[in-house]
Image (tube, grey):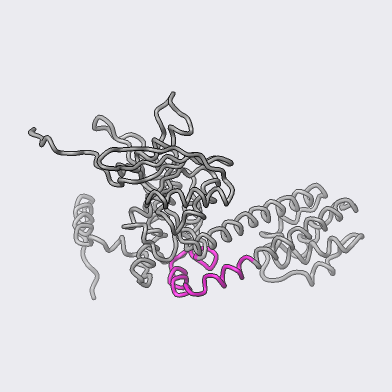
Amino acid sequence: MAQRKDALFVTICHPVCCGLDIHKDLIVACLLGDEDGTEYWELREFGAFREDLICLRDWLLEHNCPIVALESTGIYWRPVYNVLEGSVQVILVNARHVKNVPGRKTDMSDSKWLAGLLRHGLLRGSFIPPEHVRDWRDLMRMRRGVMEHLGDYKRRVHKVLESANIKLGSVLGDIFGGTGRRLLGLLLDSATEITTAEVEPCLRGSLKHTTEEICAALQGYVRDHHRYMLKRYFHLLESLEGEIVELDSRVQVLMTPYDPILQRLKAIPGIADTAASQILSEIGPSLEQFSSSAALASWAGLCPGNNQSAGKRRSGRSPVRRHHLKTIMVEVAWAAIRKKGSYYRDKFYRLRVRLGHKKALIAVAHRLLTAIYHVIKEEQDFRDLGENYLLLKNQSRKLATLKRQAKVLGYELTPLAA
């Protein structure tokens, strides 16, 4: 194959650029430039305090550097980004994608390596949402952490009840519901054996077990030690529940301008108020960084990975193991497949036969994320295809198959009268 001698496979995309190797208390910067056709580079070290970072920014502006590359090193890249944002373009890269040559690793060589890759356009930047979206994200992730602590303390309460021979979890689906909390309050206030007459006013709604069975579950060996521990745990539970209410109200105020998007998201099966806020805080209200729904699914780790060599396809497992949006979408998929008459429920049970439960759930989460992309990006209202969509798809071909199978079995397939 003939090749042009002047063909360049790696071109210079950024004549002046900078690579930063970031640590907790040290930032090593390598500035690459092109002056009179001659490439030059300059290495400098900066501290991590605000004044040092301002000196870094002034140094970059003095040399007319429009773009900077830095690795996503834990949380330490954020102070640098806070100072450089708005002054120069910042490319945040995954450290796993830009590893230096083994055996030649130093702070200075790392910064020079980053600058060289950036100079030739070989770096792919990570998604950094705007400042207000980052605020949403921090609040929603904080809320998730509080919910995890809340669940942990609820399990501790259940452990104390079991150690005191209280089998309330065996007769109630949720011991922290309305009925459960009233019965626990009765248990904490009463130092004597609880009677059926005392249990009766605490019951609410439809219950599987009778009043006598619930009363029997409350008979145990509750000592003052158990009551003290339960009171402390309930105090912590009330505090955490109050924090969740406070966080929800704060997020609601911040997301008020984007309420139309939230309302469209909540029309999708499996998405309620909290899930809609979580999704919007992770991907933002514009999706400018994602060219297609496939790009969004790949970023979230909800599509198969590519691993092919010598014409053979190896494991298609996604390289994205843990992702906040992936966790949220799996929870949404769990709720979506429980909605009767939904397309996602029918699709899940069709895929489960062939792929198994877990892979089918990930596939449903992928389809839900695709719907979310179009709802936000194209400002469309969600429309459920319905549980009969896959059945009616390619109807003529399916009818031909059914007629052929009926003929083999000795029957004739005829349509019903109108």
Q: Nearer the viewer, residue 193 or 269?
A: 269
Check if residue 377 falls in the magenta segment: no
Left or right of residue 192: residue 6 = left
Q: How far across and down, in percent of the image, does residue 303 sit?
A: 37, 48
Left or right of residue 167: residue 131: left
The answer to which quarter of the image holds residue 385 is bottom left
Q: Residue at x 26, y 42 (%)?
A: 36
Residue at image position (86%, 64%) is: 195
What is the total number of numbered labels drawn onto the structure image?
A: 0
Q: In the figure, is residue 181 to the left or right of 276?
A: right
Main SS, magenta region, reads helix
Q: Is residue 275 magenta?
A: yes
Residue at point 41%, 38% (across, down): 42
x then y, percent, for residue 169: 71, 55
Residue 317: quadrant of the picture: top left
Q: Position of residue 281 (x, y in %)?
A: 50, 61
| Quarter occupied by the C terminus | bottom left
**Furthest-left residue in view?**
2
- In front: 29, or 34? 34
Query: Is 407 or 240 nearer to us in this picture?
Result: 240
Q: Quadrant of the N terminus?
A: top left
Query: Residue at coordinates 31% horizontally, 57% vertically from top-left?
Result: 291
Range shown magenta: 247-276
